[in-house]
Amino acid sequence: MQTYEQVDSYMNEVGLKYVKDATSLLAGLIMRTDKKYAEEVAKQLNDRAQGLPVSNAEFYELKNRNLDGSIYISAAFDGGVFRHIGNMIIDCADRLSGEVLDLCCDCGIVTCFMAKNCPQSHFTGIDINESAIENAKQLAERLGLTNVEFICADVYEMELGKQFDAVTSFRSLLDAADKETKGLNYIGYRKDREDSYQKAFAPFARAVSAHLKDNGFVLSVERYTAEYGWLGWMQALAEQGINATAESGLMRAQDISSVKEYSVTYAVKADGAAPLDVYNESLSKQFKSGTGYDGGMAEFALYYDSVDDIDFYEITKNNRVIHLYAIAHNEKGKGMYFDASNDNRKIKYYNVKKEENILKDIEKNLTLYDENVYKIRRFSCK
């Protein structure tokens, strides 16, 4: 992607270089730290990749054992997204003026970039990890920055004694709200699911609001997307009077293993549009009716393109939604068949003459679930 000169220059200065694979990551860590540290990091990352229980706090403590190691690990997983974030910061530098609070700043890479490129503003980075804060202070000193400070504090308990002109959050929400989101559904009827994420994100949104001046600006880049969570996050902010703007949208960035999708939320602590209106406006820009979709766009198509009620067939186990089928129709008379599991979701459009066979297939699929183990719920709504 095309990046501003300031972004490329900063990445080179701090060593935020692209890491192409796990082997390169291990070799680079050994060069910058030592073999034992690199092996510990590799084991933690491997455990996480295999879905084994790894504490986020434990991982970030290991990551921040030294500054160079922390930066290199960030390069592997955040180098691609940082290019996008850096461009955003340059584009909205005028809104990052005055006093700016950066939540869950880790080792301060983004906070220091903002401080370097907005020299007339003052930045405060907050993180619960003491080692991360010490690394951030070292990075600021290395860069010769005097307009940034770092404080070790829990975002949910911090009392900074003042409000800020802007608050930023970059890839923070997933880790900060880990306990609150544990056990929430990834699929299911969208309103129910997103309302549950709104509730989970409410404490973080309250922390943002408590430290943001009226008419203050929020920039948030998170790993919650149209698949789940992003609408809930905008709802949680709106509940605090912080409303997303039409600039909000989705972006994709390369990391060490794959291309990841992120949500970008621009918001202001002032009256504004409803979260669902902003959500629909953002996704409709890349939507085409009658086209089959996978992932978050499949679910968006179901709700955005349908008329009248949608017929849902929901399968749950131990109160977790594990599969969801839906049938709807668009204004052109096409049928819409939605099929979602925790691994994937997809939608296809069909001629209504085929609807009888599709409904028979759904009923056949439902018989595969033992009603003594699974709960099957049929309902219709928009």
Image: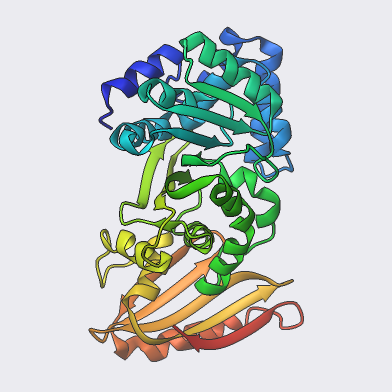
In the picture, the quarter occupied by the C terminus is bottom left
Q: Nearer the viewer, residue 36 or 286?
A: 286
Looking at the picture, does residue 90 appear above or below residue 325?
above
Question: Which quadrant holds residue 270?
Answer: bottom left
Do we see residue 21 in this rendering? no
In the image, 293 versus 360, the foreground residue is 293
- Residue 189 sits above or below residue 243 on the image: below
In the image, taking residue 85 as reference, residue 318 lies left or right, namely right
Question: Which residue is found at the position 31% from the left and 80% from the top?
Answer: 350
- Residue 349 lies left or right of residue 315; in this view the side is left
Labels in figure, total? 0
- Look at 31% across and 88% down and name the residue there: 352
Q: Is residue 372 above or below residue 301?
A: below
As rendered, which of 91 and 323 lies closer to the eye? 91
In this rendered view, identify the residue nearer to me: 362 or 35.
Answer: 35
Q: Position of residue 80 (x, y in %)?
A: 40, 32
Give the position of the N terminus as an image quadrant: top left
Any part of residue 128 in sight: yes
Where 58 falls versus 220 (above or below)?
Answer: above
Residue 75 % position (x, y): 48, 24
Residue located at (68% from left, 34% from top)? 153
Residue 281 image point, x, y percent: 30, 63
Name which residue lies at 63% across and 44% down: 176
Where is residue 146? Give x, y as percent: 48, 15
Occupied quadrant, residue 132: top right
Colour scheme of the picture: rainbow
